[in-house]
Amino acid sequence: MKPETTIDVGNEFSDMPFGRDDKDGEDNGLRFRKDILLKRLEEYEHVIIDLSNVLGCPSSFSDEAFAGLVIYEGFKKEDVLRRLSFITEFDSIKSNIIKYISEAKPKAKSN
């Protein structure tokens, strides 16, 4: 596994990420998690999420993209917090994302 990479969300995904899934538009948290973030986490031990080039990072997007790793993808929250870091000029965005990850509970698997 390679040591580290950076995802420039504004340039690689969208400068206006928004919503949870496709019903909210194409620049949603589910698509970011599935199409970009999971692939990077398979290849790299540490992923830096650069939010410098986005116009905002709404809670619906952040929760789905990052807490979704714990809720739906089987990651332990400690591992997500260890393996991701965030670049943003707004401390509130970073603290909110960390809060969403910390409060995430894995979705019970249906039999």
Image (cartoon, grey):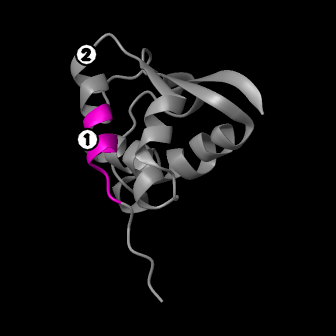
Left or right, residue 53 beside residue 47? left
User: Which of 57 and 67 lies nearest the eye of the viewer?
Assistant: 67
Q: Secondary structure at mark 1?
A: helix
* Residue 74 percent across, percent down from the top left: 51, 59
Residue shown at 39% from the left, 62% from the top: 106
Classify 10 Å Cα crowding around label 1: few (below 14), some (14-19), many (20 and above): some
Residue shown at 52% from the left, 58% from the top: 73
Left or right, residue 46 beside residue 74? right
* Residue 15 percent across, percent down from the top left: 44, 27
Left or right, residue 54 beside residue 3? left
Is the magenta region chiefly helix, strand or loop? helix
Q: Secondary structure at mark 2?
A: helix
User: Which of 6 and 23 lies nearest the eye of the viewer?
Assistant: 6
Alpha carbon separation for disc pair 2 and 1:
14 Å
**Vertical comparison of 110 with 2: above or below:** below
Kindly give the residue lying farthest to the top in the view shown: 89
Which residue carries the number 1 mark?
Answer: 59
**Vertical comparison of 3 with 97: above or below:** above
What type is the residue that disc 1 sits on?
A: Ser
Range shown magenta: 98-105
Query: Which label is found at residue 1?
Result: none
Magenta-span inclusion, residue 100: yes
Kindly give the residue lying farthest to the bottom in the view shown: 111
Foreground mark, 2 or 1, reads: 2
What type is the residue that disc 2 sits on?
A: Asp
Q: Is residue 60 visible?
A: yes
* Residue 2 percent across, percent down from the top left: 77, 27
Residues marked 2 and 1 touching at CB (< 8 Å): no
Kindly give the residue lying farthest to the right in the view shown: 1
Q: Is residue 28 visible?
A: no
Which residue carries the number 2 mark?
Answer: 91
